[in-house]
């Protein structure tokens, strides 16, 4: 007589549930927007990284069953990671890292936010990365060999560990600030069934002017910023409505995206960090860990920042007005600066109360 013994060696918790339907409605039905490219001679740093990623073709997503992420991970000890217990059921083992991506955050505080998050509690004053975000490739693994290394990290089961220990790494953060195409979104979705996205928003004219100044101050460009702005070269980062529409056309649920107005970081950095940790399923930092968190402000030492004339500003606003209205319709809220995109161009009357962060259609 042969005795067959079946033993259970481990238990894997699977925090996923299936649900039917498509929550995006019209946002998924339309074609993706082909974001305009800039003049390579004037905005080489931007176009060199984005020219190959603008995709105007979108596959429609049917109403088949999808994984639901309607419920955000609980606060406290639940980090939202997949946890595998050992035979003694006492401690978590290594697991796949949860993936978080910036979505077109350039010139809206992405560098400050990236280094604050990846250095963990204590922010940029913390010399050691103490979790929850692993920082292995620097800020911008956008394309080429850096992206290949990023792909390898997402499949590495030795980087992250489940559990609520403040020193446990649970997430990978990709701080690429430029990519906003449908093609790039699809590439991300091949690496994770449930990635989270952080989208920083800024007045698009201010954002564009900041980009041009950066090209001169750090990129070595000899451009005349006023003339370049009048010709509207390299405005990809300013088209935030188009960027959000592209992402919504690919992902499964708008709750995968956290919209963060740049001014929210200045007003309440602690609140933004809390909201990010809740969004990605990480442990909230304790108040004594966030009290010294201050987002870095780019230095303009030895450089005279160029602002635009009123006439050029109005030219850009007219060019960007429809994109701002698209952005507001997708976000479901108005922004503190966005009155110029509607008829009340010279007043902020009628604006909604200030808000910190939200998800699309919020």
Image (cartoon, helix red, strand yellow):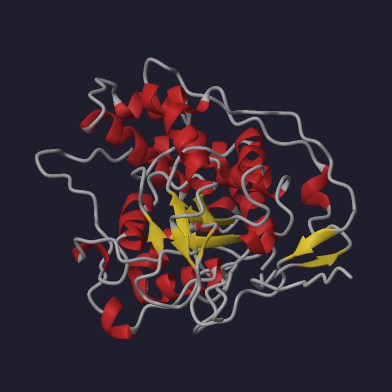
| Residue 59 locus on image (x, y percent) | 81, 36
Q: Where, quadrant-wise, is the N terminus in this rendering?
A: bottom right
Q: Where residue 63 appears, x then y in whole percent?
A: 90, 53
Query: Which quadrant holds residue 73?
Result: bottom right
Q: Is residue 152 above or below residue 198?
A: above
Q: Position of residue 112 (x, y in %)?
A: 31, 55
Front one among 167 and 278: 167
Q: Is residue 233 among the parts visible in the rendering? A: no
Residue in view at x 44 percent, y 43 percent? 177
Q: Residue at x 38, y 21 (%)?
A: 44
Q: Position of residue 360 (x, y in %)?
A: 65, 61
- The residue sitting at 36% across, 65% down in the picture is 131
Q: Is residue 93 visible?
A: yes
Q: Quadrant of residue 208?
A: top left
The mark tally for this picture is 0
Q: Is residue 243 left or right of residue 138?
A: right
């Amino acid at each position: 007589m042969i005795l067959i013994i079946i033993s259970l060696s481990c238990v894997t918790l699977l925090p996923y549930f299936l649900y039917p339907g498509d929550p995006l409605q019209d946002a998924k039905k339309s074609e993706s927007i082909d974001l305009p490219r800039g003049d390579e001679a004037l905005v080489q740093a931007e176009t060199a990284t984005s020219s190959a990623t603008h995709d105007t073709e979108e596959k429609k997503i049917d109403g088949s069953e999808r994984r639901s992420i309607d419920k955000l991970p609980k606060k406290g000890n639940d980090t939202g990671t997949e946890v595998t217990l050992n035979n003694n059921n006492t401690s978590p083992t290594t697991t796949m890292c949860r993936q978080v991506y910036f979505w077109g955050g350039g010139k809206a505080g992405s560098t400050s936010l990236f280094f604050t998050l990846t250095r963990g509690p204590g922010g940029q004053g913390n010399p050691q990365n103490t979790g929850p975000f692993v920082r292995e490739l620097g800020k911008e693994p956008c394309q080429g060999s850096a992206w290949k290394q990023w792909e390898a990290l997402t499949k590495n089961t030795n980087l992250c560990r489940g559990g609520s220990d403040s020193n446990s790494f649970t997430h990978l953060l990709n701080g690429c600030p430029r990519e906003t195409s449908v093609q790039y979104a699809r590439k991300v979705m091949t690496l994770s069934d449930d990635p989270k996205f952080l989208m920083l928003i800024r007045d698009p004219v201010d954002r564009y002017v900041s980009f041009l100044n950066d090209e001169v101050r750090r990129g070595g460009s000899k451009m005349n910023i006023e003339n370049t702005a009048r010709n509207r070269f390299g405005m990809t980062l300013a088209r935030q409505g188009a960027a959000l529409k592209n992402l919504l056309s690919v992902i499964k649920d708008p709750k995968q995206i956290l919209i963060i107005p740049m001014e929210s970081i200045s007003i309440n950095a602690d609140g933004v960090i809390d909201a990010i940790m809740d969004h990605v399923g990480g442990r909230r930092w304790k108040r004594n860990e966030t009290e010294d968190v201050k987002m870095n402000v780019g230095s303009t030492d030895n450089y005279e920042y160029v602002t635009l004339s009123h006439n050029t500003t109005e030219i850009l606003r007219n060019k960007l007005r429809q994109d701002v209205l698209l952005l507001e319709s997708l976000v479901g809220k108005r922004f503190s600066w966005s009155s110029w995109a509607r008829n009340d161009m010279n007043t902020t009357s009628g604006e909604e109360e200030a808000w910190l962060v939200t998800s699309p259609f919020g």
